[in-house]
Image: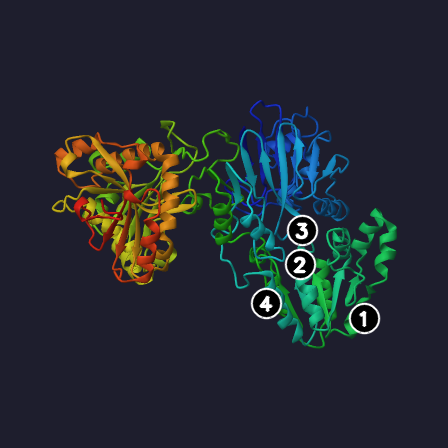
Amino acid sequence: MKLTIHRGTHEIGGSCLEISSGSGHTRLIVDIGLPLINADGSPFDWDPYRGFSVDQLQDEKVLPNVEGLYEGGKPSVNAVLLSHAHLDHYGLLRFVHPDIAIYMSKGTRGLVEVANAFLDASIRLDSVHPFKMWRTFKVGEFTITPYLVDHSAPDAAAFLIEGEQRVFYTGDFRGHGRKRILLDTVIRNPPANVDYLVMEGSMLGRDEGLYLNEDAVEQAMYQLIQHQGGPCYVFTSSQNLDRLVSIYRATRRSNKTLVIDLYTAFVLDKLSILSPSVPQFSWQGVRVLFSHYHAGKLADQDLQLLYKYRKSKIDFEEIRDNQRDKVILVKDSQYSRTVISKLRQRAKATAVFSMWSGYLERTNLRHFLESQNIEMTEVHTSGHAYLSQLKSLAEALKPRFVIPIHTFHPERYSDIFPNVIQLKDGETMELQATNRHGSRRCRALSNEFIDKLNPEKDGIYGPLVELVRQNKDLHMEFSGQLDLQNLENRLPKDEVCTIHYKGNSILNLHRDGSFRIAPAFTKGVGLPKFLRTQDDVSTYVGLAPRIMFNVANYGKTSMEIEYEQMIIRANNLERRVNSEYIVVYNQYTIFNKQWDLLAIKWPRAERRKPTGQLALIEVKYALNPEIKTAYEQLERYYTCLQEILEDLCREMELILRQKLTLKLIERTPEQVKQLEKLKLERDPKKTEIILFLVDYNPNSVWKSGMIEKAKELPFAEQIRIVDGGLAMWDQGLKRLIQS
């Protein structure tokens, strides 16, 4: 199988994904959206491109360059799947060849019909095949299962696409709308054996806002509407069904009348097929305000609709004469502004902006309302998943790889998820059929990046390594992207090295010179925009103490993570200790779980042999309640070790050599030579599982209960326990079961 993200790897909007079978006989396009931004980041405007041909639109990069997709050519795409009815996911559907099958939900079809009626979308619907949620269907060599998801667009779908591998495409989703139970259901009962998770990340880099869910939005609306002294104007999307329900419910709770336009009445009418709970123009407390433009559009579709909606018609004069109980749904249009100006309120009007705040930056709406003496309040919750929801979904699906899409910050995925593959627009990757439990990604860095970090080679980032060498309260970790099957090749993703201090990152440096530091740590620190020159790097090194000072004041204060760093220092960097363990990796993420420390045991009595043993270390500090179930953690870790031990040993051997090259591990020259040749035992029975207990009460009920359960584990003889101390010696590690 092959996967290509034609657009969406570095932007929100214009999503278009292609999946093709290994034989090449079946090609699927998933979403074909209109861009939201131009190459320079400015808002995209469709008007200049009206009337352009397909070739011209491809030349202008408005249409993604997909062979065999568009009208006028020979079709070679089997089908187009639409996740939902937002223009940035279906806005270019009109250009798809009429012989290509289109799959969409019934709610999405209803909104496409609305777009045809009011927005001149000109989308042909004779090739549409409606699918039902959770009902599997086949297209060529692929089996597809749509999953209903919570989103601001009604009847939105994620797709499980099964061929030689299993790909789960989230589309746009969230877990805090009126259908949030849908995300909980997938998390509780996830599809099994997902190889690739193509996941949106719209909220990365954004504030979650004041209202975290749709219930909070409804309550805030109710509080505003209940106390209004004049009309209340609500600016929102007529296709955001959850929001319309919130507004309707808040209006009825306040004994007010909701005034909608013909466009909204038509939308709700089309969506009535989804649920009897969708508010309708004919419901009590709902009235319809006609406009000449909307009436003309509806008349072109079906003249009978005008007579149908007339039953609930409200005249402008009726609104003007009794404004206090009116909640008026409006758009930021010239028509709405004219209505607002003509009403000239007898009592003070209010306004609610219930959309993404970024839209306000593109208009002078706030200034207009101020000129009308109308105070505006923003009440909104996002249609996209928060970070915690992204994590929960990934943890449930347990994919082999995560691929970013629909995000401005794909580089952040590697900090959050294991085994991230970051693509570029138009880049095609082979979906590898490998053992699910084998990690093909190696976190070691490429030789090119290591050379840039090496002070002995005058690497541009050498001063950063010198900084870590000189300050032993710092340590550096790698997040490379090598292919374990071919270590000469990088996977198509980013490489990152990170400097940690007190359990916090004070530098997250990408191979292209971009970097990230939490804003709280850079407060009052004038850093360069990139680290791409010697001057940039020198500036950072000079400012590092100030960043560390900010970390001490604002950073997380987990003593457990600080102890992990102290363990690294004691075992890796104190020559006079010369311990029998070398910590190779801190906070290693695999299968959505984090291992505290991965170390190499190099017994003193066997140092003439170029062999060592892998040691997995779990650190628990003081009264951490997780100690009660630590035995369960150890069991999960050991099961995982058995499945990936070969790859893990190769990875740790390589990272060990790279850290020795950068002198991030201090040993005598003779020992370094031996360690550079060291090979790890591949026998799971020779791997140690170490529970490092720091400052635990030896009489703790938690501790004693956990230890008794741990003794029942089948690998109990391999478990060692450390009580206090930092450097690790074989003689100082207690066996869980004494021989």
Give residue 441's position: percent from left, percent from top.
Answer: 39, 35
User: Considering only vertical position in the picture, is 680 above or below 552?
Assistant: above
| Residue 532 picture quarter | top left
Q: Amino acid at mark 3?
A: Pro
Which residue carries the number 4 mark? 377
Residue at (85% x, 53% y) in the render: 305
**Which image quadrant: the N terminus?**
top right
User: Considering only vertical position in the picture, is 564 above or below 695?
Assistant: above
Evaluate if marks 4 and 2 touch, with contact meaning CB atoms under 8 Å apart.
no
- N-terminal of the pair, mark 4 or mark 3, is 3
Give residue 473's position: percent from left, percent from top.
Answer: 23, 52
Asked whether, in this view, residue 252 is left or right of residue 663, the answer is right
Q: Which circle marks residue 318 in the picture? A: 1
Instruction: Say whether residue 236 is visible.
Output: no
Secondary structure category for the residue under label 1: helix
- Farthest-out residue, front: 739
Give the Cα distance between marks 4 and 2. Answer: 15 Å
Q: Amino acid at mark 1?
A: Glu
288, 437: nearer the viewer? 437
Which residue carries the number 3 mark? 154
Q: Which circle marks residue 332 in the picture? A: 2
Secondary structure category for the residue under label 2: loop
Question: Which-is-in-front pick, marks 4 and 3?
Answer: 3
514, 422: nearer the viewer? 422
Evaluate if marks 4 and 3 touch, with contact meaning CB atoms under 8 Å apart.
no
Q: Amino acid at mark 2?
A: Asp
- N-terminal of the pair, mark 2 or mark 1, is 1
- N-terminal of the pair, mark 2 or mark 3, is 3
Asked whether, in this view, residue 5 is left or right of residue 92, the answer is left
Category of crowding for the residue at label 1, using alpha-carbon neighbours closer than 10 angstroms: few (below 14), some (14–19), many (at least 20)? few
